[in-house]
Amino acid sequence: RYHDVVRRMMLHYQRQESPQTYRKTQMALAGHYNTRRDELCLTEGEQWTNEQWRADTLAYAYHFLVADPIKHWGEVLSLFVVAVRKRRAFAIEMIEVLSLGDVHDELSHKQNEIVQLFRQQLQAVEDGELRDGFAMFDRLCNITELIPQAKGYALAYRGESYIQDEKLEKALDDFEEALKHISEDAWIFVNRGVTYGLMERYEEALADFDRAIALDEKNDLAIAIRGQTYQAMERYEEALADFDRAIALDKKNDWYRYRRAQVHMLIGQLKAFESDIRVAIELGQAELRSTPDDFQFGFNLALYYLAAGNVIETESKYTHFASSCSSLAQLQEAIDDLTDFLSIQPSNELAKSMYTHLQTRIAEVQQSSTE
């Protein structure tokens, strides 16, 4: 393989010497790799996990784009958006290909600016939260050449970003618009249901979760969030039924155990509560052992110890992870979980103390960011 600089010079020469022949060659290569993809005869779900399909798709996208950067721009960006949804690591590979020098030479200044923005934003999402990629999702929502599936995903991701920024009306608008482009997508229905739930429009939330589960009956997240909605509505038997079902689908999910334990406590089933909290702690400990620097797992485990009444472990875990965490979003999420806990046990002094401790830590992080 030629050194990148030499290769770039050769491609530039070929393009200048005979543009028509160069374009035809690139289209022929794109057609070759597209045929190879099709010959694998994979379902949409299988495609994204198949290494050969991904390699051929990456080669196809490269040759297809450079064959006609203006005409094929929308289709290649659409593939990128779908990759963000289906397999984010592949989307990162795609954006790296679009950043290659010889691709850069083919694209307009505006196109190269978009590629650079997406590259930066995608890394920000990887390093932080979805809302850190808002500029990318917002830009995608305004690209008219996207195929319907990609447009729907772009709108839904912007909607999720709005949720994280507590802009619920805007989030709701985006999810509703997304469903006009992808009418039968469980993920979008779940997100709109979450938005309705945050707005305390519980019946509408339930309708969306029902729709999501009808589309994907093994969607344990949709089932568990519907259980939380039933809990918020004080429909505890239905909440328990959903948590039972979610746990049956994902037996190692510590959060589902914790949520079910809450319901057991609310209806006075103390033995069942103790059993679920014990299992939640065991599962949480296992999660933390495998990823000891994961703040979400750490704060969750601290919460489980709090529910179990273990003062020493509660204080130890909250103190350790709060002092180490500099993410305002993760600290706020931990506070939100304590707020939820205090809605059930409003007189729990330990929970109040940990809540104050986390608020103090947030103030410290905010202060340090302004210095």
Image: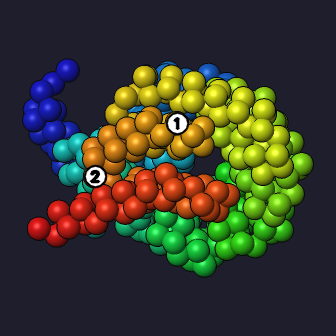
Q: Amino acid at mark 2?
A: Ser
Quarter where residue 26 is shown? top left
Under circle 2, the secondary element is loop
Q: Which quadrant of the view contains residue 234?
A: bottom right
Q: Residue at x 78, y 68 (%)?
A: 202
Of residue 60 and residue 263, the one placed in the foreground of this image is 263
Q: Which mark is residue 74?
A: none
Left or right, residue 84 beside residue 295: right
Q: Is residue 14 left or right of residue 347?
A: left
The Cα–Cα distance between marks 2 and 1, rounded to whole angstroms, is: 26 Å
Q: Measured along the vertical axis of the image, is residue 323 above or below residue 192?
A: above
Amino acid type at circle 1 is Asn
| Disc 2 versus disc 1: nearer the observer | 1
**Is residue 117 visible in this depiction of the protein?**
no
**Mark 2 vs 1, N-terminal side:** 1
Residue 116 rendering spot, x and y as whole percentages: 26, 56
Pick the front one: 153 or 44: 153
Mark identifier at residue 310: 1
Q: Position of residue 210 (x, y in %)?
A: 84, 54
Identity of the residue furthest to the bottom in this view: 169
Question: Relative to residue 145, is residue 17 drawn left or right?
Answer: left
How many labels sit on residues?
2
CB under 8 Å between discs 2 and 1 = no
Task: Name the residue beneath numbered marker 2.
Answer: 326
Residue 10 drawn at (x, y percent): 15, 36
Q: Residue at x 12, y 27 (%)?
A: 3
Q: Residue 294: x and y, percent?
A: 39, 36
